[in-house]
Image (cartoon, helix red, strand yellow):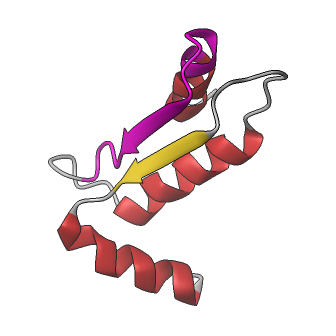
């Protein structure tokens, strides 16, 4: 189970209605921002909790990464 899946489950258990994820590791650790984005999206698509109040996930992107991520998502790279 990924870090993001665990966080979604904890958010559900706490009765949260929304959660925000920054692109963890994409800054000082130089992990590719698009890979972190994909991991978050994958975790969200796998998340299944009957009766959950969790309805909104916000992905926080640093301004300098936003253009690169948009291009990568549009081109499928």
Q: Is residue 56 left or right of residue 68?
A: right
Q: Residue furthest top?
A: 14
* Quadrant location of the N terminus in the rendered image: top right
Q: Which of the 4 quarters of the picture holds residue 43?
A: top right
- Residue span colored magenta: 10-26
Seen from the viewer's position, the closer of residues 50 and 62 is: 50
Q: Position of residue 11 (x, y in %)?
A: 54, 20
Residue at the left extreme? 28
Residue 38: percent from left, percent from top: 55, 57
Give the number of marks: 0
Quadrant in the picture for the C terminus: bottom right
Q: Residue furthest bottom?
A: 75
Residue at 67%, 25% in the rendered image: 53
Residue 7 is left or right of residue 45, and the answer is: left
Task: Look at the picture and state if 77 lies above or below 40.
Answer: below
Q: Relative to 71, say whether 34 is above or below.
A: above
Q: Is residue 50 left or right of residue 74?
A: right
Reply above or below: 73 against 9: below
Nearer to us in this view, 9 or 57: 57
Residue 22 among magenta residues: yes
Q: Residue at x 28, y 53 (%)?
A: 26
Asked where in the image residue 31 lies, by quadrant, the reply is bottom left
Measuring 63% from the left and 30% from the top, which residue is drawn there?
54
Per the image, is 73 magenta?
no
Residue 9, percent across and down? 63, 20
Pinpoint residue 69: horizontal percent, then vertical percent.
40, 74
């Amino acid at each position: 189970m990924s870090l993001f899946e665990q966080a979604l489950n904890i958010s559900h258990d706490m009765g949260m209605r929304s959660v925000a994820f920054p692109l963890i590791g994409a800054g000082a650790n130089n992990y590719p921002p698009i890979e972190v984005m994909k991991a978050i999206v994958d975790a969200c698509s796998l998340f299944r909790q009957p009766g959950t109040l969790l309805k909104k996930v916000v992905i926080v992107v640093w301004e300098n990464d936003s253009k690169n991520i948009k291009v990568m998502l549009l081109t499928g790279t």
